[in-house]
Amino acid sequence: MGDDLAIHATGLAKSYGDVRVLDGLDLRVPRGGVFALLGPNGAGKTTTVRILATLTRADQGRARVAGFDVARDRRHVRRRISLTGQFAALDEAQTGEENLRMMGALAGLSRAAARQRAAELLEQFDLTAAGRRRVGTYSGGMRRRLDLAASLVGRPSVIFLDEPSTGLDLPSRQTLWHIIAGLGASGVTVFLTTQYLEEADRVAGLIAVLDAGRLVAEGTAAELKQRVGAQRLDMTCVSAAAWTQVARRFGDRAVHLDEPGLTVGVPTDASAPQVRALLDAADPGRDLVASFAIRGATLDDVFLTLTGSAKEALRV
Amino acid sequence: MSDALTMTARSLRLATRSPDALLTALLLPVMLMVVFVYLFGGAVDIGTRYVSYVVPGVLLLCAVIGASSTAVTVCQDMTSGIIDRFRSMDVPGPGILAGHVAASVVRNLASTALVTAVAFGIGFRPHATPARFAAALGVLLLFVTAVSWLAAAFGLLVSSPEAAGGAMFALMFFTYASSAFVPVRTMPWWLRGFASHQPATPVIETIRGLLLRQPVGAHLWLALAWCAGLLAVSVAVSAAAFRRRTA
């Protein structure tokens, strides 16, 4: 296995009872930058993170993280990673600074070094003013920032973030994206899970799409968007008969079919020539489509398109 | 080892951050002692001053009350995100638990000192040599450590902090149904059988004997055996439960 990879997993499988959560997952994550594992609830994202962060053992398959096997060299892996889960791993009754100093001591820093590292991180995450307040008084966004700061105390080379923006408002989410992008640019590897295409698009250089425990697509944001269409053109038809005609014209390319609402949605890059061409293809006689709207593609569209194109590939 | 120290410091700091819980743990045993001495003390004829009789039992009650908050905090740790952070930082499970237990022992020393001080104020007059004092303190410490590990095991076995606290309060029954507050010989035969063959009675008899300069006899060995056994089982159960919870 090449050591140019921060994470290299082959054939990871994990079941809980009868539920097969991971079903032969392969991952290749290069060193440095942000890698996003995108998938809906229940796709196996958290299980993947827990296996890679040495907290859970896979039933089958192998994984190397930061050059070490997650099952056999746990300690070596743990010294090089950090994990920030969906729920803040902080003591609410301690101050922000006390939390960071405690993590510093656990990471093996001396008292003085832990104190200095805490001050640095508070500064870096814009929490210096709140450092002496108890975490219980922090807002959701501040908590997330402190949680992230705590994960960096031991200077890990691979950082796992499991759905970091869950429960945050938009401004906090944008601050977080900025921080994550900055971490990726600083040379560490960030492995992020998310359910939001937009989040993966904003921060990640490489995106892997996970569905039912398997990867269904992998690539840069631009590559995925080419396959999927980052936007969706929704055409609302004049009648049920018109809707049926338009839907039939697009066939498998339609990612959104709403019969009562008389709407057919297809992927688009939202460029004027393409939208014009799509409208002409749907309605050459100009009497079927009443109106149209362009909206951001949802994860559902991505999956429908990816699984649809997979079916086509099989047919060929 | 240094991880365990960091975790101990953390547990102690967290304890000082919930002053109401700390105050309850400190004052409840004192209040119980005062109630027993003034309400029931007059009616109980045991040949010595009742306050001197009752202090060892109150100290054990203290240990159980103090340990219940250990069960709660262990359970809180296990059900929050922080346990994954600690594990991903390679803090060993025994280190995390040992921190909770050590903090529990330190908190108990504080409440023991408070109970003893108040007891002196209301007439407790032990007459023991320094060696016997030290021996009594040693037995008490062993008991506190064993009960604290038992609390850690409870905290790992139950799924909610409330259940953890409840389970520990049930343990208080062991101190009531012992020679803590009345001599076992005054109990009905069926309760006497239970009271004589459970850990609290030999521990209390040993501490009482050491403090009041009475012979302790076989109580000492029984007390040591009970505490060592309880400690060994609790540590083993905790380790197994921790592995199971984090598998």
Image (tube, rainbow, N blue to C red):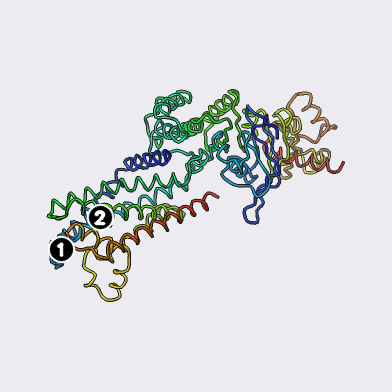
Element class at badge 1: loop
Residue at 67 percent of width and 47 percent of height: A22
Check the residue under mark 2 and report the chain it is in: B
What's the amino acid at mark 1?
Answer: Gly
Badge 2 or badge 1: first in the primary sequence: 1
Q: Would residue A120 be found to the left or right of residue A253 on screen? A: left
Distance of mark 2 from mark 1, alpha carbons?
Answer: 17 Å
Q: Would residue A153 be found to the left or right of residue A63 on screen? A: left
Query: Quarter holding the N terminus of chain B?
Result: top left
Give the percent coordinates (x, y) of residue A239.
Answer: 77, 41
Question: Can you name the residue that lies furthest to the right here?
Answer: A316
Answer above or below: position of B148 versus A188.
Answer: below
Question: Can you name the residue that lies furthest to the bottom here?
Answer: B189
Does residue A291 show up? no
Element class at badge 2: helix
What's the amino acid at mark 2?
Answer: Leu
Return the residue at label 2. Answer: B59
Residue at 51 percent of width and 38 percent of height: B89
Q: Along the line of sight, which residue is nearer the eye, B191 or A40?
A: B191
